[in-house]
Image: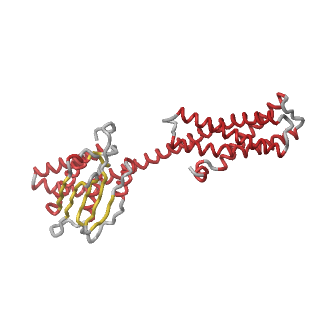
Amino acid sequence: MDFMQIHRFFPFGKLFRFLLGMTVAVQLIVIGYNHYTGYHLIPGVDYFLFRLFRGTTLSLVAAFFLAYPNLFLIRYLHNVAPWSKTIFKRLIIQLVFSVLTASIISLSFTFTANLLTPYSEDFKGVIISNILIFIAVNILLMTILEAWIFYIENQKAVQVAKSLQEELSQIKFEVLKSQINPHFMFNSLNVLSGLINKDVAKAQQFIDEFSQIYRYVLETIEQPVATLEKELDFMRSYLFLQQIRYGTDLTYSVNIPSNMLSLVLPPLSLQVVLENAIKHNIVNESKPLSIEIICEGAVLVIKNNIQPKISAVVSTGLGLKNLAKRYALISDKVPEFKVVSGFYIAKLPLIEIDKDERTDY
């Protein structure tokens, strides 16, 4: 962490007010103790104020010289020796650092103070007492700064978790809303109405697949991931309904190795890509739409020919943005969407999870 990062983490104003309060408190304790023990008597108010002002000023400067090295050390150790892994080692490092830093700065400021106004007490005794005071104060300062950083990071973590939860809830809502799309419902019910009079067996199959779709939505909407096998099952139900509507004008092929089926991805990922392909392209006898689904390594590739509708549906890109956000919640892998040689290609990374982490997705 550099100097600017320290200032962003600890605003100068807050640090100044904290150190000022701390140095005034320490000076009052030291002056009162010295006067009470007879080590250095205070003859009057004027002299008390002078000692308090001089001691506070020098101590405040010294406090900054102590605070910044402490902050740099704490932030550095957070990365290389976190408390969760090396408690004893970190305690020793911080204790030794606090003693050495306090001793060096104490000597520097004691000699400076003596040059400005020579001490009337035994200078050797002043040096020893100041070193002990600086060490005690620096250990206390290191402890307070550690607690301060822990509090700030904990507050930030709570805020981030809250933001992520809100964002996840919004994403789930958008996904669920897209599945209960009134156009999709209306078109499906129209198709079903026509089938009932023509082909009862196919109408029953249509109802079964339709119910499978919404059962899958309700089962997976709260899950962070789903297996590729379940996504492909959902895809077949979804495309079955679409093929009832478009017939042989809509075709698809799937070529996925069996060892890839246990890998996971955000639920309903395939539906987002397939819905985009059908919504934005012409699907008729003269211009059939063909969808190809394959694997390239650990990446699911969905490819379709591009034949945009004349009265093109305005795309908000919300579905793809939500899909990218859902990937960000579970992985550092990013889905890709691009046009290559007249084909729209979507690449969805497949994620491998440990057996210990696996639940019934």
Left or right: residue 82 compared with residue 205: right
- The quadrant in which residue 128 appears is top right
Locate residue 352, reporting x and y percent. 31, 45
- Figure check: 35 above or below 194: above
- Figure check: 336 above or below 173: below
Q: Which residue is painted at 51% across and 39% down in the image?
A: 82
Locate residue 14, reporting x and y percent. 65, 47
- Where's the C terminus, which quadrant? top left
* Residue furthest to the front: 124
- Figure check: 243 above or below 47: below
**Residue nearest the observer in this picture, 160 or 95:** 95
- The quadrant in which residue 246 appears is bottom left
The tally of labels here is: 0
**Residue nearest the observer in this picture, 271 or 208:** 271
Q: Which residue is painted at 87% across and 40% down in the image?
A: 47
* Residue furthest to the bottom: 310
Q: Which residue is painted at 26% across and 69% down in the image?
A: 341
